[in-house]
Amino acid sequence: MLRDPVSRYLSEWKHVQRGATWKTSLHMCDGRSPTQDELPTCYSGDDWSGVTLTEFMDCPSNLANNRQVRMLADLNLVGCYNLSSMNESDRNHILLGSAMNNLKNMAFYGLTEFQRKTQYLFERTFSLRFIAAFTQINSTRAANVDLSEAVRRRIEELNYLDVQLYEYAKDLFLQRFQYTRQREHQAERLKRREERRWLREQREQSRASLPRRRGYGGGGDLATTTEDYTSQVARW
């Protein structure tokens, strides 16, 4: 599941602000965890509870930045967490390309902002049905944060790789949705056409099986005559 980068970033900030940590995460890459120099912590103490949004944004090693790209990309391609292995521009280009490619090769992924379409694609991809419809909830902690335009731009700058990934993901997601829906509609039309054809065949077979009476001289089928014409003439 992917999410709008600004909303996702704010949601993680709120989560950390309440005391959440990732201390147990090893961040394993190429067989080892990053060193303290490669991945400095953003806070001292047990957690970062009570952190302000400004403090959250000001930590350069904050893993909340571009988290979706990093989680989807192959970090081995850029030397894992060793930022000195290549320049930043090349590193970001490789990470974004890797994340996009891995996403494209997934049989399924969903978007938080498109719950119903996500459910539709999941059910059609895996031939499964949920017992209840997905619900689109837009009133989240992230949505309730009052942001100035300057702060929003700052978050987008910190997550500019995620912004590009999300635009790509949304475009591909909607293409998959439209393609799947068109295929389903085509299958439904074909099914209805086959049903109509079967009904026509059944009606034709029913008419062919009705008993028929031959007319005089074998000239074709005639309705049954209840009284001979000559007897009518004699009676008149």
Image (tube, helix red, strand yellow):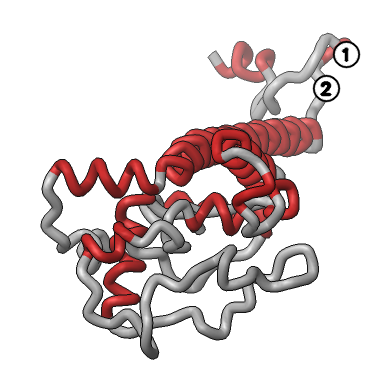
Lateral position of residue 17 relative to residue 112, left or right: left
Question: Could you tell me which residue is drawn at 56 percent across and 85 percent down?
Answer: 24
Q: Do the residues labelled 1 and 2 touch (CB within 8 Å)?
A: yes
Depth check, front residue: 14 or 232: 14
Q: Which residue is at a point 54% across and 33% down the rendered structure image?
A: 175
Q: Of the residues shown, which amino acid type is indicated by label 2?
A: Arg
Q: In which quarter of the image is residue 92?
A: top right
**Mark 1: amino acid:** Gly
Tell me which corner region of the image, top left, top right, bottom left or bottom right, holds residue 127: bottom right
Check the picture and name the quadrant holding the C terminus: top right
> How far from the left and from the top, in percent, is residue 155?
30, 49
x and y percentages locating residue 87 in the rendered image: 60, 38
Quick one: label 2, few (<14), some, or many (20+) residues within 10 Å?
few
Residue 135 visible (yes or no): yes
Query: Circle 1: is it few (<14), some (14-19), or many (20+) Cα within 10 Å?
Result: few
Q: Which x, y percent locates residue 47? A: 36, 85
**Relative to 151, does residue 193 appear above or below in the rendering?**
above
Q: Alpha carbon of mark 1 to alpha carbon of mark 2: how far?
A: 6 Å
| 218, above or below 18, in the image | above
Outermost residue on the bottom side: it is: 46
> Which label number is shown at residue 218?
1
Tell me if residue 188 can be seen.
no
Which residue appears farthest toward the right when viewing the image? 218
Secondary element under disc 1, as helix, strand or loop, is helix
Which disc is residue 15 wearing?
A: none
Residue 36 position (above or below residue 164): below
User: What residue lies at 38% left-to-right and 50% top-to-bottom?
Assistant: 5
Q: Is residue 52 left or right of residue 7?
A: left
Q: In the visual, does 107 lie left or right of 165?
A: right
**Residue 214, numbered circle:** 2
Choose between 232 and 192: the one closer to the eye. 192
The local secondary structure at tag 2 comes to loop
